[in-house]
Image (cartoon, rainbow, N blue to C red):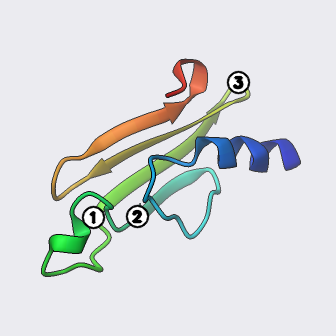
């Protein structure tokens, strides 16, 4: 279990993304790129998916408001 926690901590997405949990699965949160300037600043418009495939942990994210997206982890770690 410790190796999964360590891997997830190294895969935490881009700076500013705050997740309530780093468990594998789908998460929703506010977007560090646009939420601060929105009327609905607390609306969780950023989707983050954390997955594990053959021991590689990766995270993908996309904002459904401004379109900001990215990924980290896996064999092509950013």
Which circle's residue, 2 or 3, is located before the other in the chain?
A: 2
Question: In x, y percent, where is residue 73?
Answer: 56, 31
Q: Please tell me which residue lies in front, 17 or 3.
A: 17
The answer for how far apart the CA atoms under marks 2 and 3 are is 25 Å
Label 3 close to label 1 by CB (< 8 Å): no
Query: Tag 3, which secondary structure?
Result: loop
Q: Pointer 2: what residue? A: 28
Question: In x, y percent, where is residue 71?
Answer: 43, 35
Residue shown at the point (87%, 49%) measured from the top left: 2
Tell me how many marks there are.
3
Checking the image for residue 54, the label placed there is 3
Outermost residue to the top: 75
Q: Is residue 1 visible?
A: no
Q: Residues within 10 Å of mark 2 (few under 14, many from 20)?
A: some
Checking the image for residue 45, the label placed there is 1
Give the number of the mark in front: 3 or 1. 1
Left or right: residue 10 versus residue 69 is right
Left or right: residue 63 versus residue 51 is left
Query: Tag 2, which secondary structure?
Result: strand
């Amino acid at each position: 279990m410790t190796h999964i926690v360590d891997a997830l901590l190294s895969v935490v997405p881009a700076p500013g993304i705050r997740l309530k949990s780093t468990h594998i699965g789908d998460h929703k949160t506010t977007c560090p790129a646009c939420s601060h300037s929105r009327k609905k600043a607390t609306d969780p418009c950023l989707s983050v998916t954390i997955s594990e495939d053959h021991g590689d942990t990766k995270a993908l994210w996309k904002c459904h408001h401004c379109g900001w997206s990215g990924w980290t982890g896996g064999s092509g770690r950013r």
